[in-house]
Amino acid sequence: MTTKTNFETMRQTLLLLFLALILMPDTINALPFKEISTDNGLSNRRVQESILDDNGYIWFATRSGIDRYNGEFFVHYTLSISAENEVTEHPRGILINDQKEIYAFSEANIYKFSYETDSFHQVNNVNLTQREAINAITFDPTGHLWIGTTEHLYRFNTNDSTLQSIKQKVAVHCLLFEKEKHGWAGTSKGVFHLVEQEDESYLPRREKYLSALNDKRIQSLYHDSLTHHLWIGTFSHGIYIYNKPQKELIADKDVHQAVPVRSITSVGTDRIWAGVDGAGIYEYNRFTGERETEYSHNATGYKYLKANTIYHILDNKNSIWVCTHTAGVFVYNKNRLVSTTYHHIENNSQSLANNHVNCLLEDDRNRLWIGTNQGISRYDQTDGQWRHFFQNDQKDNAVILSLCQDKEGNVWAGGYASDVINIDRNDRIHIIDLPKKEGSKPTKNYIYAITQDQEGNIWLGGIINELMRYNPTTHKVDYYPIKGINQLLTYGKDTLFVASTKGVIIFNIQTEKGDYLPVGEKEKSMQFITQSLCIPPFHPTATLDWNRRKRSTLLSVD
């Protein structure tokens, strides 16, 4: 192995490390939901709906009016029948059609945005009765406007401005059209399938596979064009998934609260978010339909959301815009670094065993193993459950300093004056009795580091004990005269990096010989305390990180 030192690269690396250390506290504590409130210029904290236009602006329908947001400033618009009329109406929703035209509506009227006048103008000839209020509007594939009210379902012909009643004596709460010219209406009496006829009209009909919903109020609909599932949110009976290819209706049986599901949309490539008015956001697996997590006011860490009154969700590439009825808008940044804090809670087994944490390991099942001063705690991120090992151990296995998972999925652990521990995939604990070096006195193990090489051997090291190679098949142990070990790191088939109290040792597994890492033109050995080593996944380079008396550096070794 050859080494080289590029001082300019080193200087730049040190600068980046310094900046990272300065910025890390603020970044690591940043939660993914950023609040946008009236303090930021939003016209009202009650936000009904949002859209994204072709220019990248986000439009919000609030209780006070329509807000256009460019990421920094707001522009406010009102809904008024005429410029002379000082009475403004409360928006109930906003949408953008395939022609990129923006529409908004109140209980009584529909408005279209004019780019020429930079204002909203009433759409004429939409003559509804005074006793009904508009709940939802949308456009069908032919470009005609559909209107759902508290009394009827209408189709407004945008060519001749005629209004046609499609379904009477039913409250329509949501409307949806697919690109295949099929539509769906969510009503107070279940779901109606809107089927296009030869004359481009649509006929509402019942689907027998959705008959279980006929007595339920449907609050929201979302058609997933990828899976061909129709997601159905009800007012007080949870969420249903209609698998159209299989003609099967599936209910989310875990919903216990009788709260309205007001918005459903896909998020990214594999998730569905459902906005629940009173319970926050439910996150589902897009393909299995299983609920995986929740974001709410009652959650902690990165799942915490200040308000539970979700009215609308809009996915916009790296950001998700969440409209609430009580707290304005929250923007979820998919790329923002988040952190979750795990800590010990007295007399609560479903918490970390001890707050003194020495080592971490994430296994192949995404479970988090934590070595503490009171044994091992394991957190399963799928069900949120903790399990503890050696928490009340009367032997010397309490202080765990090292963890490693082998190729078979077994977890190895060692610590301060402890046994060498093997926990198999079934959570059976095996204490490894290491044969002592011939002629040596019986001593306790101080295992600060564990790793596995490509041959399956387990390497162990510590401050007092010598470097050991243990063969799990033959139970043979080989000893090497290297002590003061803080970390072990295999590199390829032949190399073992040893972070020690005297520097970095490069140990050749095949020749069983090691030497300190040389640096500089004169190949002088580094002699300083080395705490940790890592190999970045993006480049086959060993990186040394060390700390002594509050000094730190970063060294790349090609």
Image (cartoon, rainbow, N blue to C red):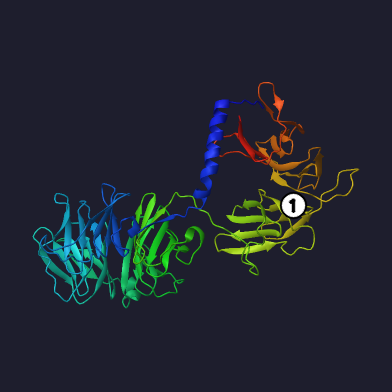
Q: Is residue 541 above or below residue 56?
A: above
The x and y percentages for residue 455 are 70, 41
The x and y percentages for residue 217 are 31, 74
Q: Is residue 323 above or below residue 508?
A: below
Foreground residue, 243 or 76? 76
Residue drawn 54% across the image and 61% down it: 382
Q: Amino acid at mark 1?
A: Gly
- Where, by quadrant of the figure, is residue 129 drawn? bottom left
Could you tell me which secondary element the residue under label 1 belongs to? strand
Q: Is residue 459 left or right of residue 305?
A: right
- Where, by quadrant of the figure, is residue 203 drawn? bottom left
Q: Is residue 539 above or below residue 27?
A: above
- Where, by quadrant of the figure, is residue 230 drawn? bottom left
The x and y percentages for residue 89 are 19, 66
Residue ID for mark 1: 415
Q: Residues within 10 Å of mark 1 (few under 14, many from 20)?
A: many
